[in-house]
């Protein structure tokens, strides 16, 4: 018994990307009501699916509002990390001081004002025993600090 080639219709691969037009169908935001984050995750393979942020994706609808509340409450931590990571978008450096140096001082101020001294740059060991000095004002070290801020944001939303 042979397969007739004319009846063989490959199903193709599930689409793992989406086009700009498809994203505009929903807009770029997370579909959960009031969520300020971009919709970056979907199970959709046809471009008509629902897009959620990484915090709302896969959650029960009844959980959405509580998650949105926490995201909005702690969004400032995510924004502080973004200021460090994309300093040149936020600050104008010059020959004497770089955008990253300005971001470093500015974000420290934001964190102190919020009363979260636990989030200030520090010397610490990673879980692999590697020492990280977040207090040094080099671009790489600030990236390590920004990662800890993003982890802190996630912990505030999903618990410790
Ligand atoms: Zn969301």
Image (cartoon, helix red, strand yellow):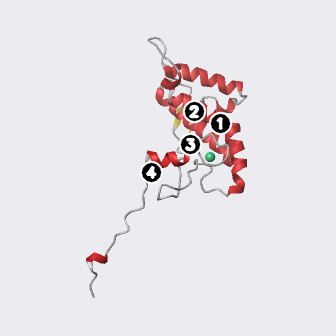
Q: Earlier in the sequence, mark 2 or mark 4?
A: 4
Front: mark 4 or 1: 4
Residue 38, numbered circle: 3
Q: In the rendered image of this protein, does residue 84 appear above or below residue 97?
A: below
What is the CA distance from the residue labelled 2 to the residue labelled 1? 10 Å
What is the CA distance from the residue labelled 4 to the residue labelled 1? 27 Å
What is the CA distance from the residue labelled 2 to the residue labelled 4? 27 Å
Q: Position of residue 86 (x, y in %)?
A: 50, 29
Q: Secondary structure at mark 2?
A: helix
Q: In the image, what residue occupies the spot 56% across and 42% down?
A: 38
Label 2 sits on residue: 81
Q: Secondary structure at mark 4?
A: loop
Residue 75, numbered circle: 1
What is the CA distance from the residue labelled 4 to the residue labelled 3? 14 Å
Q: Earlier in the sequence, mark 3 or mark 1?
A: 3
Front: mark 3 or 1: 3
CB contact under 8 Å: marks 4 and 1: no
Task: State yes or no: Cβ of the residue under disc 3 lies below 8 Å from any atom of ligand 1.
Answer: no
Between residue 118 and residue 131, name the one nearer to us.
118
Front: mark 4 or 3: 4
Between residue 16 and residue 113, name the one nearer to us.
16
Q: Position of residue 157 (x, y in %)?
A: 67, 45
Q: How many marks?
A: 4
Task: State yes or no: Cβ of the residue under disc 4 lies below 8 Å from any atom of ligand 1.
Answer: no
Front: mark 3 or 2: 3
What is the CA distance from the residue labelled 3 to the residue labelled 1? 13 Å
Task: State yes or no: Cβ of the residue under disc 2 lies below 8 Å from any atom of ligand 1.
Answer: no
Figure quadrant of residue 107: top right
Q: In the rendered image of this protein, does residue 98 appear above or below residue 7?
A: above
Q: Position of residue 3 (x, y in %)?
A: 28, 81
């Amino acid at each position: 018994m042979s397969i007739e080639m004319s009846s063989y219709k490959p199903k193709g691969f599930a689409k793992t990307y989406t086009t700009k037009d498809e994203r505009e169908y929903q807009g770029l935001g997370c579909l959960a009501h009031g969520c300020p984050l971009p919709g970056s995750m979907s199970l959709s393979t046809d471009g008509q699916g629902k897009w959620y942020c990484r915090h709302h994706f896969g959650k029960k609808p009844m959980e959405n509002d509580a998650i949105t509340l926490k995201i909005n409450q702690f969004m400032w931590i995510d924004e502080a990390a973004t200021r460090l990571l994309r300093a040149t978008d936020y600050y104008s450096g010059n020959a004497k001081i770089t955008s990253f140096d300005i971001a470093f001082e500015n974000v420290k101020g934001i964190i102190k004002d919020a009363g979260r001294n636990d989030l200030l740059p520090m010397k610490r060991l990673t879980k692999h025993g590697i020492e990280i000095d977040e207090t040094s004002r080099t671009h790489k070290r600030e990236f390590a600090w920004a990662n800890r801020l993003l982890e802190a944001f996630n912990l505030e939303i999903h618990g410790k």
